[in-house]
Amino acid sequence: MTDHHRLDLPELRPLWSAVHDRLSTGRPVSRVRSGPLDDAGREALADLLGLDRLPGTEPTIPLAGLDGAVLEACGRPVRDVVTAILGPIHDRAAERERKAGQRDALWGWLAGHEVVTAQPALLEWVGHLRANGLIDGSPDRTRGLLTAALTVLAALPADGEPLPVLSARLLDGDSHALDDGTRLSSLILRALAAQYGTDVPDAAEERRALWSRAGVADDELSSGVLAVGLRAEGEGPVATISRVCARAGHPVSLTLAQLRTPGDFTGPAGPVHITENPSVLALALRRFGHHCPPLVCTSGWPNTAVIHLLRRLADDGASLYYHGDFDGEGVRIAAHVIAKTGAVPWRMSADDYRAAVPRVPSGPDPGRLTPAPWDRALVDSMAELRTAVVEEVVADLLLDDLADHRHR
């Protein structure tokens, strides 16, 4: 029998457990409180320490004295003895620090991910997730689910795919990964709610509506886009309709079904301007008629047809320029369009906003504000002046830009 077995007495187990626990804190230890000890334990401790009387039932023992007594009894320090009896001594302080570092790294990675930085409204989503902690307490599992969620968010708005088809295409063939009620589906819907500035959906019907807003299983006929001056080339039906309407000075309304199968179609090269509100298109037609430059309207949050057309135009060589309302929602829409289509801001800087505010000295409040990725000073200016400026207020400036193709 080895020495440490001799000290592994049932009556001393409370002592060894207390020492093991204190050493595992990872902090300096000078004294250890043991107990409660029964009479046999008190006698064993007195024998070990060489005391001339019995200690109390919950004695506090100087660790140096205990270490010296154990070393004298078995030739090994107390750390070795409790390790042999109860297993390895852990460093809980270092473990807590390591886990905190993992958590900070995870949330820093998420906040700095390109999907989030492109649409800062998602920082609200990041904040909620961080406040609620890791999924199952695991950084690796959390990162895995977030990676899948970001993969889906980067692909939205979808091109009208059913949810299982989208899921299978993006998530390693798993058509059920985004089924209603899954943790991943809930993560993405919360992100979409933050992005669109809506409540997190509770009912199944509300969840389906939010997926639809993100282009999942969009109705090919009800999802459409309004444009003017779209002088496309080609003999396909979409090119022909667009060209005829442009030459007549009429708007064209294209459905997602048409845009999916446009036939022979090449969009106009050069600048294509984008506005948030249809009224600006109406003003452009009134001023320019059949000479109207290419102008596409998102009609608020862009649906799948809008994004589809803008991406097609960009692929065909068009340069996209976006303008929207100067309010919280307008900035989020602008960030979304820019992130999804590669458009650049058009008269959407902090200086543009400050110059426009005097036009509406009693304008409405801009509402919930989130950063504008293209100009960090913009949201600060809006927070300071607390005045929304809708597109119609600066329509004359926008039309002047269209007239001479200046882009700001």
Image (tube, helix red, strand yellow):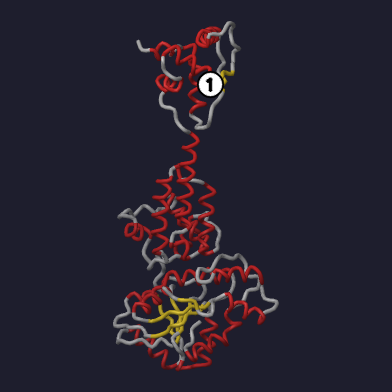
Percent position (x, y) of residue 273?
A: 46, 82
Question: At x 44% / y 59%, what residue is drawn?
Answer: 113
Q: Residue at x 56, y 23 (%)?
A: 31
Does residue 79 sit above or below 307 in this rendering? above
The secondary structure type at the circle numbered 1 is helix
Disc 1 residue type (three-letter): Leu
The residue sitting at 34% across, 55% down in the picture is 171
Residue 149 picture location, percent across and down: 42, 56
Q: Neighbour class for label 1 at 10 Å: few (<14), some, many (≥20)? A: some
- Which residue is at the front of the view, 206 or 130? 130
Q: Is residue 265 above or below residue 52?
A: below
Residue 88, image x, y percentages = 41, 27
Side of 326 relative to 112 (left or right): right
Seen from the viewer's position, the closer of residues 132 and 65 is 65
Nearest to the observer: residue 85 or residue 295:
85
Tell me the residue that label 1 is attached to: 63
Vertical arrangement, residue 58 with respect to residue 349, above or below: above
